[in-house]
Image: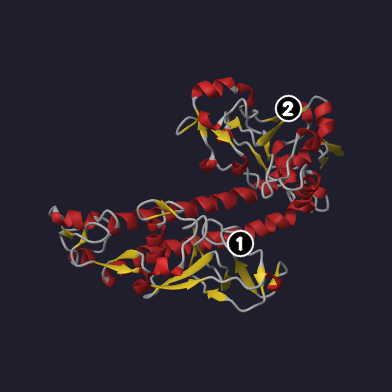
């Protein structure tokens, strides 16, 4: 059955509600902790990103009770060139968040005969997103409104088939999300080890206090540690450790952009990355390619953004061309895990370096003179032996996620258009036909 969202609304089984007007929710209402509010930038590919949500206090939230979201609601990004066409389903952990001014909420009645999970996949399908972008209001800053959303065409098969389709697609999505959680936990663990050894100097302090070992550190490595700190340009550091300019420990390649006539999206040449637009959790996704010669990053090189946002980091998972917004980094001893977590620490706050000064761009002259702590190679080797296997596991789960995403994106339009059908009689394990 083909319907529009407007037909579901007119039948009284669905509703649309735009987030609170600017007169109802001001920037001054935001606080550091409280009830999260869903802004445009928190709405991604079917998922909500809680990390970018501002907060309001309980009193303000009480004023906006009608804008609280429920499990199964679908939120549309209302405005923005990149955001138009994106929508996300509200999952149980998001129950009670406030729909922000940059979002529109779609709520389905239980009697609608529409599975919200099924519909969330239908709405994120390329064809639907293209329809939304084509019908958005405004050429410079596209906007969605309730009138536009009412016109969205939707294919609604039987409820049993909707459940089966949603089950297939969600199982792929859930595995991708599980892999990403695994990757993030591994990274958090490696960061914690780096900070303990090379920022807080916990093993050195433990030795100074009389300890004969440190958890997780090889005994032979612990034995080589000093038991005192000394002053340095970076503050106290262990006795015998050095502080060196970045140029002394890192091979730095600054990007340079070829002419745009050499760019393409058909896969000709090498992947080309101008900045952070296509950054992922650890590796960038390849969208633009370039057939001209350029500044090259090799697999494993760290990709540092040198234009706003300065300091955002990814890793090259294949040979690629660096645009002017990126720099490629390789440790002189090929200790890429040590260098990666060192850069995560140095650029812990994007756009801020050293004393917190804000930079919109940094050049090679600035970077090569940056002071970095340079522990003895034996200590770095010991860290590498711990962190490198974690990074390899991250590579493994990210590669699996990429394959699962390719399969999901292949099945998505075929399942949702009926070109590939699922056996709805066995919802526990739907079969593709």
Left or right of 420 on screen, residue 100 = left
Mark pair 1, 2: CA separation: 38 Å
Task: Please say if the residues under marks 1 and 2 sit with CB atoms less than 8 Å apart.
Answer: no
Look at the image and tell me in which quarter the N terminus lies. Answer: top right
Q: Give me the residue at 73% from left, 57% from top.
A: 410
Snapshot quadrant of residue 381:
bottom left
Look at the image and tell me in which quarter the C terminus lies. Answer: bottom right
- Residue 88 location (% of width, % of height): 65, 41
Find the residue positioned furthest to the left.
Answer: 210
- Residue 363 location (% of width, % of height): 46, 66
Q: Give me the residue at 60% from left, 48% from top.
A: 174
Snapshot quadrant of residue 67:
top right
Of label 1 and label 2, which has the lower sequence position?
2
Q: Inspect this view and state whether residue 432 appears.
A: no
- Residue 168 location (% of width, % of height): 69, 48
* Marking on residue 110: 2
Q: How many marks?
A: 2
Left or right of 214 on screen, residue 98 = right
Q: Nearer the viewer, residue 196 or 146?
A: 146
Q: Residues within 10 Å of mark 2 (few under 14, many from 20)?
A: few
- In this picture, is 16 found above or below 367? above
Q: Give me the residue at 73% from left, 48% from top.
A: 140
SS type, badge 2: helix
Q: Nearer the viewer, residue 176 or 199?
A: 199
Snapshot quadrant of residue 155:
top right
- In front: label 1 or label 2: 1
Q: Inspect this view and state whether residue 412 appears.
A: yes
Left or right of 120 on screen, residue 293 = left
- Residue 430 location (% of width, % of height): 72, 47
Which residue corresponds to mark 1?
285
SS type, badge 1: loop
Q: Nearer the viewer, residue 313 or 12?
A: 313
């Amino acid at each position: 059955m083909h319907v529009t969202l407007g037909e579901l609304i007119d039948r009284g089984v669905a509703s649309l509600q735009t987030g609170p007007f600017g007169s109802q929710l001001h920037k001054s209402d935001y606080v550091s902790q409280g009830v999260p509010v869903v802004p445009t930038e928190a709405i991604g590919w079917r998922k909500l990103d809680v990390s970018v949500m501002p907060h309001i206090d309980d009193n303000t939230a009480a004023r906006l009770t009608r804008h609280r979201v429920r499990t199964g609601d679908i939120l549309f990004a209302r405005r923005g060139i990149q955001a138009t066409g994106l929508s996300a389903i509200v999952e149980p952990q998001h129950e009670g968040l406030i729909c922000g001014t940059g979002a529109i909420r779609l709520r389905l009645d239980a009697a609608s005969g529409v599975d919200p999970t099924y519909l969330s996949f239908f709405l994120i399908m390329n064809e639907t997103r293209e329809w939304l972008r084509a019908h958005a209001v405004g050429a410079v800053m596209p906007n969605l409104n309730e009138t536009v959303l009412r016109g969205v065409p939707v294919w609604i098969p039987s409820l049993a088939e909707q459940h089966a389709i949603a089950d297939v697609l969600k199982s792929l999505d859930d595995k991708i999300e599980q892999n990403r959680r695994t990757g993030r936990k591994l990274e958090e663990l490696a960061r914690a080890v780096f900070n303990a050894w090379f920022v807080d100097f916990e093993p050195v302090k433990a030795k100074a206090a009389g300890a004969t070992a440190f958890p997780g550190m090889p005994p032979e490595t612990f034995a080589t540690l000093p038991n005192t700190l000394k002053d340095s340009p970076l503050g106290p550091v262990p006795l015998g450790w050095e502080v060196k300019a970045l140029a002394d420990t890192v091979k730095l390649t600054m990007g340079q952009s070829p002419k745009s006539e050499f760019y393409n999206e058909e896969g000709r040449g090498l992947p080309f990355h101008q900045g952070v637009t296509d950054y992922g959790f650890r590796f960038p996704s390849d969208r633009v390619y370039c057939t001209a010669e350029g500044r090259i990053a090799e697999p494993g090189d760290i990709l540092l953004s040198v234009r706003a946002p300065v300091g955002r980091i990814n890793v090259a998972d294949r040979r690629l061309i660096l645009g002017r917004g990126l720099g490629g980094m390789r440790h002189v001893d090929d200790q890429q895990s040590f260098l990666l977590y060192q850069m995560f620490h140095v650029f812990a706050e994007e756009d801020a370096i050293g004393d917190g000064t804000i930079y919109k761009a940094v050049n090679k002259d600035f970077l090569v003179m940056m002071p970095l702590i340079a522990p003895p190679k034996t200590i770095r080797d010991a860290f590498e032996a711990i962190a490198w296997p974690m990074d390899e596991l991250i590579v493994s789960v990210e590669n699996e996620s990429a394959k699962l995403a390719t399969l999901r994106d292949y099945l998505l339009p075929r399942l949702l258009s009926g070109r590939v059908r699922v056996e709805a009689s066995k919802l526990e394990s739907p079969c593709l036909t």
